Amino acid sequence: MGKKLRLTTAQALIKFLNQQYIHVDGEEYPFVEGVFNIFGHGNVLGIGQALEQDSGHLKVFQGKNEQGMAHAAIAYSKQKLRRKIYAVTTSVGPGSANLVAAAGTALANNIPVLFLPGDTFATRQPDPVLQQIEHEHSHAITTNDALQPVSRYWDRVTRPEQLMTSLIRAFEVMTDPGKAGPVTISISQDVEGEAYDFDESFFQKRVHYLDRKAPVERELNGAVERIKKSKKPVMVVGGGAKYSGARDILMDISEKHHIPIVETQAGKSTVESTFANNLGGVGVTGTLSANKAAKQADLIIGIGTRYTDFATSSKTAFDFDNADILNINVNRMQAYKLDAFQVVADAKIALEQIAPLLEGYTTSFDSKITEFKEEWAAERDRLSKVKFNRENFDPEVKGHLSQETLNEYAETLDTDFVQTTALLTINEEISPDSIVITSSGSLPGDMQRIWNPEVPNTYSVEYGYSCMGYEIAGALGAKLAEPEQEVYSFVGDGSFLMLHSEFITALQYNQKINVLLFDNSGFGCINNLQMSNGISSYYTEFRTHDNQVLNIDYAKVAEAYGAKVYRANTIEELKEALEDAKKQDVSTLIEMKVLPKTMTEGYESWWNVGIAEVAESDSVQKAYEEKEEKLKEAKQY
């Protein structure tokens, strides 16, 4: 019989987490960096006691909101290319319920994170306990069951010995690139404190090998055959290419064979924007250059992408009647999308094996790639110079709002600042190795189009779930991942109001982040969506009971927390604020009042949305008819 260690379930959990290592390309290091916590009923006396007694090498951070700290953990893993994680522990009931949005974010983005919510009593002796829900049809259901559909792996531990198989399975999932995602292990609160004689071998060092899956010969031959047959292939670079570290081989193939690169949100900054053949974002939030190249392509090479509706313009971005599809993806389900020829393999190793088989091949794009890129550069330059004039309205600025309404915003917010101008100014002024974070509203669209990352892996936009409230928490996670780099959170006023609790955590632990707050007094992106589809502005602007535009001093809020704050409503003020913010050791917030309808519009793209088929409004009926016409062009699977 092997030696036994008598530990509580929670103590065994923490001891196990300290012994998990990952091995990637010859490097080996601890996989679990630390634990975010909000202690409460159900975890403070179990996991809390275990961490207080012996946390080992794990760093422990106190969060302020369960969703917020979970988003920080997700951003950390994302920035670390999914090769390190934080665990997240919460109380039972409301604490665990607050994890649901974050779990969805991790699942949609294929990001590993370990959720450890407390649960009700396994013995059921005191049931119903504080924060326990009850169902007539089953006593076994708790709040944590809400996490099942948003977890890659889910388990409930009701006996100490169950922990062993549960944890081994959890780490298998989190360290598998093909199915990486959130894992939830809820532990009954009485079981957390229950002792058991664990085998000492369970706590030996475990190494999880991230072995790169190579393509089989059939896959290689099929991929090469399709590429060589094509005249105008385009490589769609997704998050899988970034996590694989495929930058160098992507650039090599693109340069040698004259194949343009277009990017998804997750794939952006895999290859820097300065690379000659990188045409930028594709799809609904894509650049004119990328969307033009995509339309001309006779072969779409999807590399680590899951083809969301934004990347494919609701399956109209490509000429599906005349284009073949080749997918390289470590996940078999994703490789099958768009009825493609599938290469189920790691992106980097697949491209490295394809590369020598393409000798002598070149595309017929000729000078087109350069022309596309130059055309977009001119448009981007034009956007940097757009100005708002209260008397002479540019229809492109005005959008769907009336002259009177825009004047009202300008006067109430005391600004004429244009959002695109602000963004392009920031892009020019901050250090090129700065990490930028955003997630929701109009900012991700503007960022994918006009933000030029000059350094790889510095663009960390969460658009798989586009979860409002991720932006500031995500900045904290990215800062923990890259403490030597400046991190900037791009957040709208809507998202700031929804969740900015981890700004306080950043201040508390002296993890400097820079919050760039774009205040247009409303949910501007959704206002655009309703008005561009025939509906008048309806409950998407922030207005008082007597219909006045809200003007909130967000800088005062941040100042009260202890941040260094700035107010910048002009290019000059913004430049001064950015320069001074670089010198600060404390977290900063720059509040910018920007006018609604001053974000970018789509470039040769379309988004399929649920427009009312029957409506009294002529404009809604017209929008529906236009949608139906566009739908005829779309691929249906």
Image (cartoon, grey):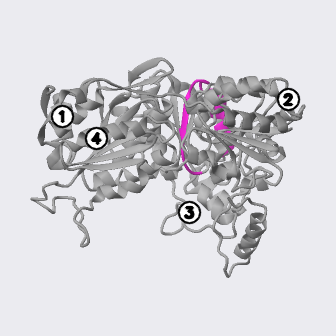
Q: CA distance from mark 3 to mark 2?
A: 50 Å
Dot 1 crowding, Cα within 10 Å, few <14, some 14–19, many 20+: many
Q: Secondary structure at mark 1?
A: helix
- Return the residue nearer the eye: 139 or 563: 139
- Which comes before the other along the chain, label 3 or label 4? 4
The residue wearing badge 4 is 165
Q: What mark, if any, has residue 362 been given in the picture?
A: 2
Q: Is residue 523 above or below residue 485?
A: below
Dot 2 crowding, Cα within 10 Å, few <14, some 14–19, many 20+: many
The residue wearing badge 1 is 50
- Which comes before the other along the chain, label 1 or label 3? 1
- Which comes before the other along the chain, label 4 or label 2? 4
Q: CA distance from mark 4 to mark 2?
A: 52 Å
- Return the residue nearer the eye: 547 or 521: 521
- Looking at the image, can residue 538 be seen? yes
Q: CA distance from mark 1 to mark 3?
A: 47 Å
- Which comes before the other along the chain, label 1 or label 2? 1
Q: Is residue 380 left or right of residue 202?
A: right
Q: Secondary structure at mark 2?
A: loop
Q: Which amino acid, mark 3?
A: Thr
Q: At 49% across and 50% down in the image, what residue appears? A: 467
Nearer mark to the viewer, of 1 and 3: 1
Q: Residue furthest bottom?
A: 616
Q: CA distance from mark 3 to mark 4?
A: 48 Å
Q: Secondary structure at mark 4?
A: helix
Q: Is residue 544 above or below residue 442?
A: below
